[in-house]
Amino acid sequence: MNLLVCISKTPETTAKIAFKENDTQFDTDGVQFIMNPYDEWYALVRAIELKEQLGTGKVIAINVGPPSNDIVIRKALAIGADEAVRVNGEEKSATFVSKQIANYAKENNIDIVFLGKETIDYNGSLVGGMISELLDVPFLSYASNLEMEGDTATVTCDIEGGEEILKVKTPFVISAAKGLAEQRIPNMRGIMMAKRKPLVVIDPVEVTENEAIASYSIPDSKSGVKLLDPENMDELVRLLHEEAKVI
Amino acid sequence: MSVLVFAEAINNKYKKSSLEVVNYGAKLASSQGSNVIVLTNASADAAAELGKYGAQKVLNFESDSLHDNKMLSQIISDVANSHNADTVILSDNSKGKSLAGRIAIKLDAAAVSSATTLPNLEDGFVVQKSLFSGKAIGHYQMKASKKVITVAGNSIGLEEMGQPVAAEAFDASAYNATVEMVETKRVEGTVPLPEAELVVSAGRGMKGPENWGIIEDLAKTLGATTACSRPVADTGWRPHHEHVGQTGIAIKPNLYIAIGISGAIQHLAGVNHSKTIVVINKDPEAPFFKAADYGIVADLFDVVPRLTEALQKFKAS
Ligand SMILES: Cc1cc2nc3c(=O)[nH]c(=O)nc-3n(C[C@H](O)[C@H](O)[C@H](O)COP(=O)(O)OP(=O)(O)OC[C@H]3O[C@@H](n4cnc5c(N)ncnc54)[C@H](O)[C@@H]3O)c2cc1C
Ligand SMILES: Nc1ncnc2c1ncn2[C@@H]1O[C@H](COP(=O)(O)O)[C@@H](O)[C@H]1O
């Protein structure tokens, strides 16, 4: 089976967030980037496990982004992807990214596309549905378990306050939530091997921009905490009722 | 031109998030001078109630199974096309977000998920959404003539703004599922975390799972849902579905009470949009106090039972 894993990068979670060009661009100066946790911990690892279980097939990591993303892609190879592809373009919008990935999947006979349930910076959660539609295949979203038997998958999908257990045949797209796999830390051997694995760079297909971030702003911060006397919980209850009006 | 809303029902009942999208669609339509159509998977009786939240026309098909987003996105797109809708509004939950991307491709529409504001129509069509763990707001210009929006819960409030309308049956029998449903499991009893208005959450300050009785007592007294920090779920002190934060569930309740949680940025990312935050921590330097509205610097084992008592007194009065 050919398994394609979508890998994105995101600012390291404690990174300072600032903007430039009149608040129209994210200032990446001094920002450390990491692989999006849902992609790294769950989507990628489950794809690798599946290949190991089947004993055949390959795991291809794909990223849409600039050359500076190669470091994140190399990490995917170090964790265990067999090969990698980078579509050389700025990740302008979910539509742009999805069309690049769907295009690659169509041309390369992919059985399952794995991705993260969302990126933790922009929290779009749109790419999976878009790729599925472009490929005209089912989309199993927020998956916390995947078992394969032949070409049939049984997938547990998280829904609000519960889960759905679904059955589907390949090809399909699956987005990973917590639980789909256990995080793997790349070892020295993996890191060395990653250097010899292929990382192919391809040109993007053209996409019309349907939406764009016109500007960024910083939310109003809290006005400051009101510290209360631990001996007087009646006062907290009164404030929650009368001032905050939440109870 | 019209606005199409999909309002999800579970067993012929609507959650607040489904009513909110109807409200959102109605308000958008009125600001554009267009009309709002609501498509829903409930009985005609249940569906008629959506008129109260602003629906002008309601189309219903009875189905409890919305598990196949391929089929459902086809239904919604077909209705959008046949009713000349240029904007599709969905709930910002696992279903709505999975549908949004598909529908955006079908309609060649601009898509934004988790919008927190109504579109600003003064300068094109701009909606806001929270980015970078709540550290910034993105102002999205939706340029394409068609749009798909999922609306973040608790963003624009919920109000009654109309009368029930008779629902028209929509025939969905010609659509076939491509995914087989094996089983749906729902947590019974308490309100699921993503929908809870009141949340009591605890962290590693609890010392061990055996101490959670005081948290459960407090939650029960308040009628709140319980949550926890990530290490607490990772070590198995609490079930995984209680884990909130950047890698867990993001929530936006009216009240979030954080007990023995330090307030790491990854935790805050999932909870800092709560309307009111109360922090109980013995360390006055705990970063959570910076994000709090009310703070109590004290030992949680002393103060939590006292808070429960005060609430019981309040409820009884
Ligand atoms: C990529 C990444 C993603 C992450 N995602 C998440 C996430 O989604 N959610 C999440 O929660 N974390 C997440 N984390 C972990 C996060 O960084 C923190 O480690 C975690 O939130 C800390 O949990 P805690 O506050 O329960 O524990 P601690 O940091 O150990 O804090 C315990 C607190 O309890 C207080 N305390 C102790 N005893 C008492 C007492 N008797 N009375 C009162 N107060 C007391 C202490 O003063 C302290 O502030 C993530 C980390 C990374 C790197
Ligand atoms: N630039 C990108 N390159 C490759 N995959 C991506 C990219 N952006 C997003 N993805 C994938 O799509 C998932 C969901 O992203 P989003 O819809 O943007 O929240 C991520 O977890 C990745 O798996």
Image (tube, coloured by chain):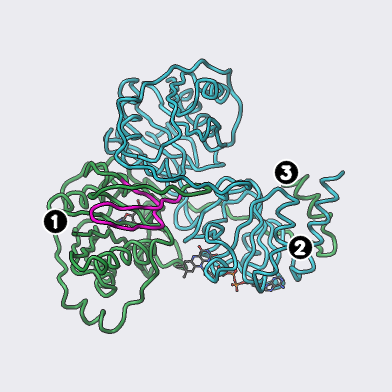
Chain colours: A green, B cyan
**Kind of residue at disc 1:** Asp
- Measuring from the top left, give residue B139's x and y in whole percent: 42, 45
The span shown in magenta is A139-158
Callout 3 secondary element: loop
Mark 1 or 2, which is nearer the eye? 2
Callout 1 secondary element: loop
Task: Return the residue nearer the eye: A114 or B103.
Answer: A114
Residue at x-position 19% and y-position 59%? A1
Label 1, label 3: how far apart the Cα atoms are:
55 Å
Circle 1 sits on which residue? A203
Say whether residue A143 is magenta: yes
- Same-chain check, marks 1 and 3: yes
The answer to whether mark 1 is within 8 Å of ligand 2 is: no
Which chain is mark 2 on?
B
Q: Find residue B49 and report its image quarter.
A: top right
Image height of B294 relative to B121, above or below: below
- Same-chain check, marks 1 and 2: no
Which chain is mark 1 on?
A
Assign the C terminus of chain A to one quadrant of the image. top right
